[in-house]
Amino acid sequence: MTRIPRSALLLGLAGLLPFLWSALTELRPDLGDWAVATLGPRFVGPYAGLAYGTVILSFMSGVLWGFATKTSGREAAIGYGLSVIPALWAFFFVGGGPTSAAIYLAAGFAGLLALDWTFWSQGLAPEWWMRLRLLLTSVVLACLAVTIFA
């Protein structure tokens, strides 16, 4: 595999900040209390991570759709169909209390990783794609685990 382009790596890592913030404010109640008073409750603890995770899961559907455009015919139709799964998953399953929402969101990101691999193995994603996606997904799942098991 080739190296992950610097801009993709840096922006991907920056995209982890809301997940990390969510986990940190859940693990450190003093920080969570400060953040609630300063930023409001929607930017703290599981609420921040779950809202952002839902957005990112939907965003990744668009990325997969873009990969599907690189092919045609039956392969494209299958790719388009697969690409909408993460957004639909987030819409239909991520809700309820924080624990169940985090479980469904984690399952969505795990499923997304399988879809990433599918598109990558077909040569529709860049060579470095799985290196980036494995890194980012492992951090996302670790952050969501804080909500699931806290």
Image (spheres, grey):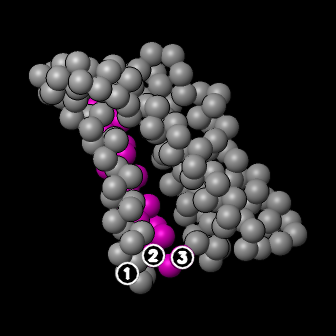
Q: Position of residue 28 (x, y in %)?
A: 14, 27
Q: Secondary structure at mark 1?
A: loop
Q: Secondary structure at mark 2?
A: loop
Residue 66, by quadrant, is bottom right
Q: Amino acid at mark 2?
A: Trp
Q: Position of residue 96 (x, y in %)?
A: 51, 16
Residue assigned mark 2: 128
- Disc number for residue 126: 3
Q: Amino acid at mark 3?
A: Pro
Q: Is residue 36 left or right of residue 57?
A: left
Query: Tag 2 or tag 1, which sits nearer the N-term?
Result: 1
Q: Are marks 1 and 2 in contact (CB under 8 Å)?
A: yes
**Which residue shows up at 62% across the image and 36% down it?**
89
Residue at the limit of the structure toward the left, as seen here = 30
Q: Position of residue 98 (x, y in %)?
A: 41, 20
Which range of residues does the magenta coloring cover? 126-149
**Which residue shows up at 38% across the image and 23% down it?**
42
Q: Is 38 or 105 nearer to us in this picture?
A: 38
Report the magenta stretch's main SS: helix
Q: Is residue 105 left or right of residue 65?
A: left
Q: Secondary structure at mark 3?
A: loop
Q: Amino acid at mark 1?
A: Arg
